[in-house]
Image (cartoon, helix red, strand yellow):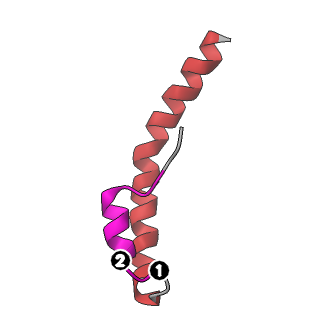
Amino acid sequence: MTIDPDPASVRAFGSDMGDLAAWEPAYQAGLRQAGDVDAQLRSMWRTEADAS
């Protein structure tokens, strides 16, 4: 599974990754996305473990 920034995270990053003002919103967007991805990863890992 590949995890890329979701659209909200991309918007939070903005066009200049060096813009320090964007770091906190980008961090918060990443935390939110991590919560969303967590369930997907857990179910994927359980499925693969069950298949073994």
**Placement of 1 over or under 24, stated as above or below:** above
Check the picture and name the quadrant holding the N terminus: top right
Callout 2 environment at 10 Å: few (<14), some (14 to 19), or many (20+)?
some
| Residue 37, horizontal then vertical, whole percent | 45, 44
Q: Is residue 51 left or right of residue 17?
A: right
Q: Is residue 9 magenta?
A: yes
Secondary structure type for disc 1: loop
Q: Residue at x 58, y 27 (%)?
A: 45
| Residue 5, horizontal then vertical, whole percent | 43, 58
**Which residue of the protein is positioned furthest toward the front in this rendering?**
15
Q: Is residue 8 magenta?
A: yes
Mark 2, residue position: 14
Check the picture and name the quadrant holding the C terminus: top right
| Residue 32, horizontal then vertical, whole percent | 39, 57
Q: Which mark is residue 29?
A: none
Structural distance between the alpha carbons of marks 1 and 2: 7 Å
Secondary structure type for disc 2: loop
**Contact check, label 1 and label 2, Cβ < 8 Å:** yes
Say what amino acid the circle numbered 1 marks: Met
Q: Residue at x 50, y 48 (%)?
A: 3
Mark 1, residue position: 17
Q: Residue at x 45, y 35 (%)?
A: 40
Q: Which residues are magenta?
A: 4-17
Marker count (numbered): 2
Say what amino acid the circle numbered 2 marks: Gly
**Placement of 47 over or under 9, stated as above or below:** above
Task: Give the image quarter of residue 10.
Answer: bottom left
Q: Residue at x 62, y 11 (%)?
A: 51
